[in-house]
Image (cartoon, grey):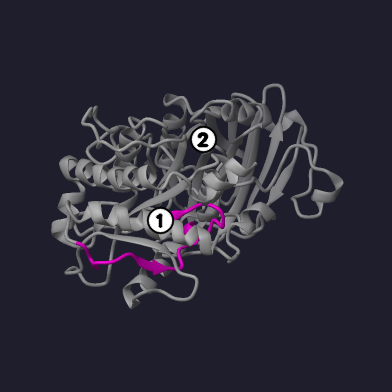
Amino acid sequence: MGFSIDGLADNTLRDVRYWPSLDYSRITFESADTMHYHLFALDHPKRLVLDLDNVNATPALQKLCDKVNANSDPWIARLRYAPNRPGVLRLVMELRDDATPTAFNLAPVGNYAHRLVIDIYPGKAAANANAAQPNAAQPATQPAATNNLSAAAAADKPQIQQSPDTADVMPSPKTTDNANDASIDTHINAPDSATGSAPADDTPLGNFTITRPVIIAIDPGHGGEDPGAHGEGGTLEKNVTLAIARRVVAKLNRIHNVQAKLTRDGDYFIPLAERVNKARRMNADLFVSIHADAYVTPDARGSSVFTLSEHGASSAAARWLAKSENEADLVGGINVHTNDRDLAKTLIDLSQTATNNDSHRIAHDVLSQLSKVNHLHRGFVEQAGFAVLKAPDIPSILVETAFISNPQEERHLNDPDYQDKTASAIAHGIEQYFSSNPATLRGKLAKRQ
């Protein structure tokens, strides 16, 4: 086994970030300029080797190794580094099993400078094992490089090169005293007030009866490299959305005939189109994306529920919000060279009249329940062109739980009691809809097959 991916240019390392998950593990290197790199794989034992040009070994790299080695990364057994030859720093990732890596550079965006992203996906056998589990996560994107490429696919993929095992010969890792310091931001999904698992709650949701099995995809907005909006007090949208989403799933799964699943259950990035693809792989009857609103002024407040607009946003604020949310892929970092038609299909504006009708009715029921918990930003279901709402065959809604840019509502979003009430409202609205409307478009299609 062996392949190589070559990048361009030069760099000075500024930062290193690490995002492990069962979907895939991501390591991001940030630099002042575009990075020059070479990535290849070795066997016996299975390793990935990353050569970085003109990069000094900073304390951040040792911290990265310590985190990877101490926290039992799902795909990387051990990480080490050392100078390999003049001007080249080598990182070696010992793998637990077959893995499929991808590497790509990202141009500066937002607060980020140039980034080199290394994603480690499970190999085919591991991915199949995960898929066999009911709540197993799926890879966040289709990798840009694979171990075995067909002749037809090779034209769109990096070329394979054989690399001798002697390439792994290197001294013991050390950090250099004169290296530029850099920080490492690691997130191992430890429970806390924002991201902890939903507490046990046996409160019944209502006296409704859902007569057929229903699958619901709950999508916590943002994650990983993409923090989403942030409040004046430092609260990150990605944390509160995950906390509320976990509570929604726990409540829905107590309802007879309902099975709810998260699109992500940790702090890692998922592209917008892949969130929709996950829901489709689940055969979901409903897709609910959970967010925390933000606006340019701190006095904006209230909860909102959105459905997809086929023509235009229902307000200037809705248009601004959709644009902001749709830029998540730029911040989170996707490989724009990946050629995956399935991902592209989910973003095509198809005729969605039936789906949108179901979406609007569900959104109305959820908004009605949210009005009992928080002030409503507007008294009706809003519409905008959110990318995550564009599945042509799955009713989809986007819930803005509160304005994280409003100091008072930011405090509410960090309050476990408010999180729980908001989750109950969302779950109540969903339960109310499916008890009185047993067949959405997805349910009708499943019944017809």
Q: Which residue lies furthest to the right in this view?
A: 151
Q: From this viewpoint, is residue 113 visible?
A: no
- What quarter of the picture does the N terminus occupy? top right
Magenta residues (range): 376-396
According to the picture, the residue beneath numbered tag 1 turns out to be 397
Marks 2 and 1, the one that precedes in the sequence = 2
Q: How far apart are marks 2 and 1 (CA)?
A: 22 Å
Residue 328: give x, y in percent of width and height: 45, 59
Residue kind at label 2, given as amino acid type: Ala
Left or right side of 156 for 429: left
Residue 63 painted magenta: no
| Labelled pair 2, 1 in contact (Cβ < 8 Å) | no
Q: Quadrant of residue 379?
A: bottom left
Residue 372: give x, y in percent of width and height: 17, 52
Residue 388 painted magenta: yes
Left or right side of 419 for 20: right
Left or right side of 411 for 444: right
Mark 1, Cα crowd under 10 Å, few <14 / some 14-19 / many 20+, is many
> Residue 137, which numbered label?
2
